[in-house]
Amino acid sequence: MSTKGIYTALSGAMAQTQKLDTIANNIANANTTAFKKDQQVFNEYLTAFEKDAEVIQVPKVPASIESFYDLNGSDKSYVNSAGTYTTFDQGSLKATNNAYDIAFDGEGFLEIADQNGQIQYTRAGQLTLNDQGQLVTKSGKSVLLKTNDIDGNVSDRSIFISGESKLNITENGEVFDGEKKVGQLSVVQFKNLNQIQKIGGNDFKLKEGITSTVDVVDNPKIKQGFLETSNVNIITEMTDMIMAQRVFEGTQKGISIYDSLEEKVNNQIGNTKG
């Protein structure tokens, strides 16, 4: 008697563990500015798909249900993680009345650069000034000006504010230091949002091997004095967590049943005297 089904149950338990981790991370970031929730995706993995079709072989051992046909692994299937994808639905807008807070009412990502000059993207509009009077994100990354020279030096696109006058950012992203126009924020969008990935700190970058498919948003809808909230729905996440926990418990029971059957096969059936 085979108990290979225990591996199917085990793969299911592992899959639910991954799902619970993803849900827990979503819940932990429910109050994170502009956070985009993740979802775990699974599919069925069949070992038979790894093998070419083979001719049925006549068994060289006494026939049994399992040995009569060469199943080539078609009797084995597992739960396979197909990865995690990010849901980019917009969160609601919350008024802060802080001139250094901005939110996107619609599509768009703010183009930013890290300390190494690497281009990144974010929708988290909690901006501030560093010691040099440069406009940066909460994590200290440079906010970039719109430019037609995509191959130019990133440092030339930095935004400096005197801090002595009122900062004003218009709906289309034009930045004014008092009455002086500094430039326009670089706001971009992607043809395929699956081409970007999270890198921590609520920022994104293009995935490895992906060529740039960035489109400039000429007329973004930016709201100064607002922040975008997370798109995590706590009720939905809690419901999904309860369901995942129940499925996990069910797979655990399945593993216990297979283990019990194995024990009976070894200790009872094997000791039966004819």
Image (cartoon, rainbow, N blue to C red):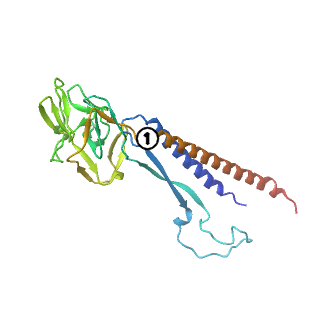
Residue 197 in sight in this render: yes
Q: What SS does tag 1 mark?
A: loop
* Mark 1 Cα shell of 10 Å, populated few (<14), some (14-19), many (≥20): many
**Quadrant showing the C terminus:** bottom right
Residue 119: x, y in percent? Answer: 26, 43
Residue 25 in sight in this render: no
Displayed quadrant of residue 249: top right
> Considering only vertical position in the picture, is 231 above or below 272?
above
Of the pair 103 and 109, the residue shown nearer to us: 103
Q: Residue at x 73, y 61 (%)?
A: 1
Q: Residue at x 55, y 45 (%)?
A: 17
Residue 73: x, y in percent? Answer: 59, 65
Residue 202: x, y in percent? Answer: 36, 38
Q: Residue at x 30, y 45 (%)?
A: 106
From the viewer's perspective, is 82 left or right of 190? right
From the viewer's perspective, is 46 left or right of 254? left
Disc 1: which residue: 232
From the viewer's perspective, is 41 left or right of 259? left
Residue 80: x, y in percent? Answer: 52, 55
> Considering only vertical position in the picture, is 65 above or below 118?
below
Work out which residue is located at the far right of the displayed protein and give it.
274
